[in-house]
Image (cartoon, rainbow, N blue to C red):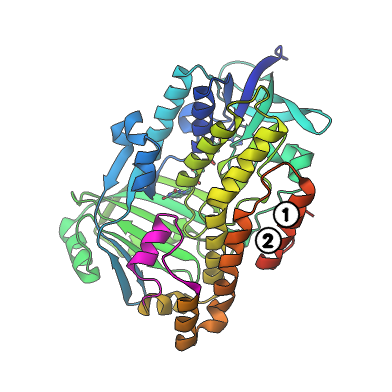
Amino acid sequence: MYSPRKKFDAVVVGAGLSGAAACCNLCNIGLNVALVEALPLSEAGAGWINAIPEKSFFDHGLEELDPAILAYKGGRYIVQSGQQKVFIKETPLVQIDMKRLLGALHKRAEKLGATLFDRCRVVDMKFLKQRPTGIALETRKPGSTPGILNLEASLFVDASGITGAVRRRVPAMARFCRGPDESHVCNATQETWTVADGSGLKNFMEKHGIEPGDTIAWTGVEGGYSTLTLYVPAHMETLELLAGSINLPRYRPGASILRDFCKQQPWIGRLVKSGSGTIPIRRPYDILAIPGLALIGDAGLQVFPAHGSGTHSILTAAKILADTVSPRADPGGERSTWEYQAGFQRKVGAVHAVYDLVTRMTINNPASTTRALLENAILGPDQLTAGLCQELPPVTVGSLFKTFTKLGLISKTGPLTVKAPLVHALYKAYPSKPDMDALGKWSRSVALLFSEDPDIL
Ligand SMILES: Cc1cc2nc3c(=O)[nH]c(=O)nc-3n(C[C@H](O)[C@H](O)[C@H](O)COP(=O)(O)OP(=O)(O)OC[C@H]3O[C@@H](n4cnc5c(N)ncnc54)[C@H](O)[C@@H]3O)c2cc1C
């Protein structure tokens, strides 16, 4: 059954955090927006606890949406590798209930006048020359026959997660957005468990030097890039666990790491909530928009690579998107979409790209390298705090070189030290005006520093 065409300024595909945040921000600047989701709306996106910088939580006004989004706040943050521990006295992160956040954003989107379509999956796209102008969605409402919904818009926003449901169907974009390959994807699981035996938990905490309210992150549990993080709320009745590793068969995925950990701790009780997924941990695609289409969130690889955190950069990207399209008659026009990608790459991409180098160093080196960095205070509280806040660390290249040479680590860490400032400067010089030749050149320079093929061939 075909429906008549419906026209919007913007159609956002995916109602996870990226889509919900982009939709609200685009409505806020007066656009007529449709938000489309494949699942029932209540099941869209992340349903677990995410940690984000506290500053980001307040800067993006999340407490005003619903104070209960803030699940946990405060406590120490401990990073441990082998026997080596580094303590951050007060965590710079807060933990947020993603289900509540998404529920609040969906409600806000409706209040702001967005049209929400759930149980709708993209099946086809329509183009004028290379620019997407329409989308066909298969609708599957329980108890009714499947139908087709046709939506037209000036701007399509792909917020469909790592698989990029729209991106893949737009040839002018798909050819620049390959991968990410599995070595740049993290397989993660977050779970909430009850505590069955409080004295067992107390013994465990004593043994590991953990206090109520602490977060402890054991790094390198599966070699190089992997972690098991435990948060013990002050009430000590439940636990928050997160584990992740590279999405390759030789590493146990997050779910197995957690299963084995829980098996070894008889004081852990019942599973309350669990969520799993794959997270891109590569710097953003070199191209994030073309006329008529913008990528946001996991669909554009806008995730902080060093710990696979998408929330802060998604909220920032949604703001940049609304700031850049606001004054235009054609929200998906070439200038708007270019300004969005240039704005993101210069502000956030520059930091993500530097941490992509750090991530590759941890993937390619044994866990003992990270241990040596912790032992020698190269990864001390200030550097780790900067990493958790998704900011550049307070170090100079000269001092790093000296320390790495002294420790005999220069062969492992030297390339990072040389490349990081170059990568950062390159992202700050992302072409500011629509110019595919300049972008091609830029992409080739980035590829050279990352020793891989350029996104824009
Ligand atoms: C276990 C785990 C723990 C994490 N922990 C943290 C953390 O502590 N801090 C942090 O900042 N980040 C964390 N992340 C990452 C963060 O959760 C993600 O980056 C973020 O949720 C991605 O949001 P998104 O909206 O881009 O994509 P998604 O959440 O994947 O949403 C995409 C939406 O699009 C819909 N969709 C897909 N295809 C179609 C289609 N064809 N048509 C219509 N709709 C479609 C999907 O159903 C889904 O609802 C974690 C991720 C995982 C997996």
Q: Residue reaching furthest top?
A: 4
Residue bearing mark 2: 446
Region in magenta: 377-397
Observer-nearest residue: 29 or 107?
29
The label shown at residue 455 is: 1
Does the magenta run of residues contain 385? Answer: yes
Amino acid type indicated by mark 2: Val
Amino acid type indicated by mark 1: Asp
Report the residue at 65% width, 41% height from top: 164
Circle 1 packing at 10 Å, graded few (<14), some (14-19), many (20+), is some
Quadrant housing residue 159 = top right
Judged from the image, the secondary structure of the residue bearing numbered disc 1 is loop
Observer-nearest residue: 51 or 64?
64
Report the residue at 77% width, 31% height from top: 131
Quarter of the C terminus within the rendering: bottom right
Task: Please state if 106 lies on the left or on the right of 302 as rendered.
Answer: left
Residue 330 in the image: x percent, y percent? Answer: 68, 24
Quarter of the N terminus within the rendering: top right
Q: Choose mark 1 or mark 2, whichever is in front.
A: 2
Residue 23 in the image: x percent, y percent? Answer: 53, 28
Q: Which tag, 1 or 2, sits closer to the chain's start?
A: 2
Cα distance in 3D space between marks 1 and 2: 9 Å
Residue 304 in the image: x percent, y percent? Answer: 50, 54
Observer-nearest residue: 265 or 147?
147
